[in-house]
Image: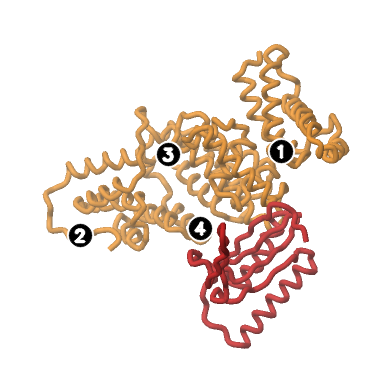
Amino acid sequence: MADRVTIGRVFRAESGRSVAALVAMFGDLDLAEDAVQDAFAVALRRWPDDGLPPNPGAWITATARNRAIDKVRRDARGNELLRTVAMEHREGDTMPDDRLRLIFTCCHPSLAPQSQVELTLRLVCGLSTAEVARAFLTTEPTMAKRLVRTKHKIKAANIPYRTPSDTELPDRLRSVLTAVYLTYTTGHGQAGSFPDLTEEGIRLGRTLRLLMPDEPEVAGLLALMLLTQARRRGRTDAHGELVLLRDQDRSLWDPELIHEGHRMVRWCLRRNEPGRFQLEAAIAAVHADASTFQDTDWGQIVALYDQLLTVAPTPVVALNRAVAVAEVHGADEGLAELDRLALTRYYAFHAARAELLDRVGSAEDAQHAFRTAVALAPDGPERRYLTRRLAQVTSSARPPSARPNRRAGA
Amino acid sequence: MTYYLLRPGRAVQGPPMSDEQMQQHVRAIRRLEEEMKSAGAWVFGGRLHDPSTATVVQADANDVLTTDGPFAETKDHLGGFYLIRASDLDGALNWAGQVSALIGASIEVRPFVDELTS
């Protein structure tokens, strides 16, 4: 039986393709969006009695197309457009998958990164405006306004509806991949919420993988998301508190996702065109490979971070590398690496420093660093974790000693 | 076709150019402008004199007040601009990228509301 939940699921799975097909026919985002929304409303009325049509996706596209034609017919200037549509798309034609064009338009680098994600969620993933609003912790009217502004820019600036040429592709693809990863990471801190943006990010990753099967960075991004997702259940305890990688119960990790992620990382290795996402996925794969934290092949991880630094030379990558260095060569080496970084406004820098200071027995400096980390951390599980750690090192601290001070950012 | 204004931001100040370098620079700009023309992208463009040559006019109900310009409140003074047409934003961005590389400044690309009439 086709209940509302089933219809909603089918709709979300199919609507991106329908919107993309309608934009290809009519060249208008708003018209396509509204028409597909109308088709959904019709489905909600009819499917509970009639049951699901044999090909729900084609049904939605055909219904939306008829709605759009009705709408255009009411507009005097639409006749020319209608003739073109009628010529190019006869009933019963198999629709080409236009989602790639839609994704490249929604994630055009001339749009702000968050606007790219919002519009992609609305048009490609088929989330309602209210759902996109909820994902970004804002109200529906505010989100509606933001979506209108983004679509207005696409129309006014004439952002094209096509996949980029070969020369444009690297820049454009980077923008798309970043938007998809931003979708995923936005959902990361919101476990168990609906809409689950981690799932939407992975779904987008799978769609891209299907539509661009030869792009190693597409595979790398999907692998990274799958391998990160695999550890999701181990990352928080029963009270929703953060559990660090070293303390996670690895039996909670999802073996199927790990298997799929590993297969994709191996495919990337054979391609031998390393990029940012592939290297991050490879690092995640090494972690997923280890049955215990101690078994982790840290030497391999440092080597991968070295490579990552050459393609993405950011202080945050260097920070993660320093943490891995500490596992291979000891906490002192790690601290020496950290002290070379200009990250004194970043809580994770102080947190990493605090852990290593605690390990080398500089309790007082560790406390100081944890205190700074707590002050800089955003509200949430990470700050609560750091607060607990601060309390631990404070209670186990010996009286102030004559140790030389090791303060950050000197 | 969409019409776009290409407007440079502040240039990164390099070492002053020799006369020879300046002439080469101007020739390179002319070449790019010729390319815009032969590609059908060129509508209009030009360099402006120094802001100290500007005059500001302000009309109110009774009078027109003329003062020494430029606008006191603007920080970035327009040194010149291009007005181009392109089939879409990507086409305009391509030209903007070439202009930016030549003049060493970022370029704001902004669409016009309607097709221009001339």
Whether residue B21 is visible here, answered yes or no, is yes
Secondary structure type for disc 3: loop
* Residue situated in front as seen by the camera: B13 or A391: B13
Instruction: State the separation of the CA atoms marked 4 and 2.
Output: 33 Å
- Residue shown at the point (63%, 29%) measured from the top left: A12
* Foreground disc of the pair 4, 1: 1
Q: Say which label, 4 or 2, has the lower sequence index.
A: 4
**Label drawn at residue A312:** 4
- Residue occupied by mark 3: A291
- Residue shown at the point (33%, 50%) measured from the top left: A352
Instruction: State the separation of the CA atoms marked 4 and 1.
Output: 33 Å
- Residue occupied by mark 2: A405
**Label drawn at residue A20:** 1
- The amino acid type found where label 3 is placed reads Ser
Determine if marks 2 and 3 fall on one subunit: yes
Q: Say which label, 4 or 1, has the lower sequence index.
A: 1
**Chain whose colour in the figure is orange:** A
- The amino acid type found where label 2 is placed reads Asn
Q: Residues within 10 Å of mark 4 (few under 14, many from 20)?
A: some
Q: Say which label, 2 or 3, has the lower sequence index.
A: 3
A257 over A168 or under it: above or below: above
User: Is the residue under label 1 in contact with that under label 4 (CB below 8 Å)?
Assistant: no
Q: Position of residue A276 (x, y in %)?
A: 54, 53
Q: Say which label, 1 or 2, has the lower sequence index.
A: 1
Secondary structure type for disc 2: loop
Report the chain holding disc 1.
A
**Label drawn at residue A10:** none
- Residue shown at the point (61%, 46%) measured from the top left: A219
**Chain whose colour in the figure is red:** B
Q: Is residue A377 left or right of residue A186?
A: left
* Foreground disc of the pair 2, 3: 2
